[in-house]
Image (tube, helix red, strand yellow):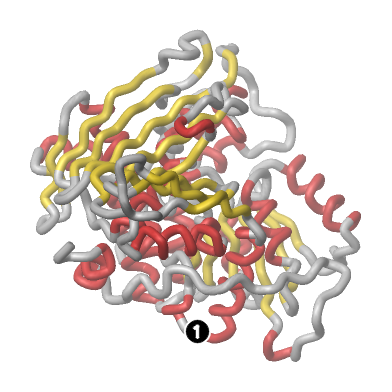
Amino acid sequence: MKNTRRNFLQQTTALAGGALILPSLGIQPWGNRTTVSAADKINIGAIGINGMGWADLKAAIKQPGVNVVALCDVDKNVLDKRMKELADMKVDTSGIKTCGDYRKLLERKDIDAVIIGTPDHWHALIMIEACQAGKDVYVEKPVGNSIGECRAMIAAQQKYNRVVQVGQWQRSQQHFKDAVDFVHSGQLGNIRTVKVWCYQGWMKPGPKVPDSAPPAGVDYAMWLGPAPTRPFNSSRFHFNFRWFWDYAGGLMTDWGVHLLDYGLLGMKAETPKTIAALGGNFAYPDLYEETPDTLTTLYEFDTFNLVWDHAMGIDNGSYGRDHGIAYIGNNGTLVLSRGGWEVIEEKQSKSKVGKPFAKVMDNGLDNHMANFISVVRSRKLEELRCSVQEASHVATVAQMGNISLRCAQRLAWDREAGQFADAGVNEKFLMKEYHNGYRLPIV
């Protein structure tokens, strides 16, 4: 492939994406943390701690020399719950301040880094303002909720020269690196198709319920932030925000950025030439959702096709797995998932490329957070395992699939111009509209 994905990123951003994945780092439990010098101590604050933000925070406090000094969430019930849990974990909570407005947290001069675990529609705004405030950032995936937001986030990281790690923690698991190395070795032969699928039996939308008053302790106006003002509905709130276009992009951007990422990495792919998506709410039409519970998207690249396939509420995905990436070559097919990887040999091939199933031996999230903290100390941005540049690339590809579905048409992408060939599609979908007085800062 003449133009690699790495070359594409170098041409469009001032920073290269950095090393793909480094060897796993040792992690120490809460009760056995190594003593570090005062100069190496890092004070962190966490914004949005109900779901992955809480998992990220727990990974962070395992790192030697990391102190939690602030928690922010729009739901006071969540704040109270997490403070109790931290105390139960024997974390000293006497110096931890809580708030419901992230701006109060960013004002603090003693905070070195922030974790952003909010719903997706807040990622870009808080990440950019955190960089402006001189903070390093660990932000949950997908990095942006639109292609335009992804670009603004890259610009902010570059302008303020901050460490920004995106929570695509699979990049910090050794077996993912090993599998991609095998793909790059050429032993599979010419790869014609990459299949990426996500069948999640435990994920279903919420029921259709009447609008109601927000629960006590919830600052619903702050939760909405730049999203359109709507009455509170419990089936749009907390975890279920994923299934509404105002706040997120459904399973395509929720799990898709994890899995599509490795489809693209394995093929050293830049952006596709065309995108065609078909899907809808076929499985659960009586539940409350806007994003599709069933979706198939075909991405056309120069030398191969990539197929995305997702289904909510069932687990029977390809190769007997509920998620995965399959690189289908002339000599064999490599099947990769969070559980491990194997190579299934093509029956007609004379090349002996079959590989038995390799199990997972490490903790990706802990490794990923250790990498972030290490780079916060070293300032060696090239060592980040998932920079905002790399994360923005896969988020852009995921957004393309959603945009094709919503337009109900096959779309062509102009790589040189960095936009769709259809000007009307660009105007409607490249950037999210902000509401309620919020504006994305001009960087």
Of residues 248 and 348, which is closer to you in this image? 348
Which residue matches tag 1?
379
* Quarter occupied by residue 244: top left
Position in image of residue 429 (x %, y %): 25, 39
The residue lying at 44 percent from left, 23 percent from top is 293
Q: Is residue 331 visible?
A: yes
What's the residue at 53%, 54% (across, down)?
140
3 above or below 335? Answer: below
The image quadrant where one finds the C terminus is bottom left
Answer with the quarter of the image where residue 420 lies. top left
Residue at 21 percent of width and 27 percent of height: 407
Residue lying furthest top in this view? 286
Above or below residue 419? Residue 361 is below
Left or right: residue 109 compared with residue 159: right
Q: Is residue 432 visible?
A: no
**Foreground: 198 or 216?**
198
Of residue 163 and residue 156, the one placed in the foreground of this image is: 163
Q: Is residue 394 left or right of residue 400?
A: right
At label 1, counting other C-alpha atoms closer than 10 Å, the crowd grade (few under 14, some 14-19, many 20 or more) is: some
Residue 205 in picture, x, y percent from top left: 55, 22
Q: Quadrant of the N terminus?
A: bottom left
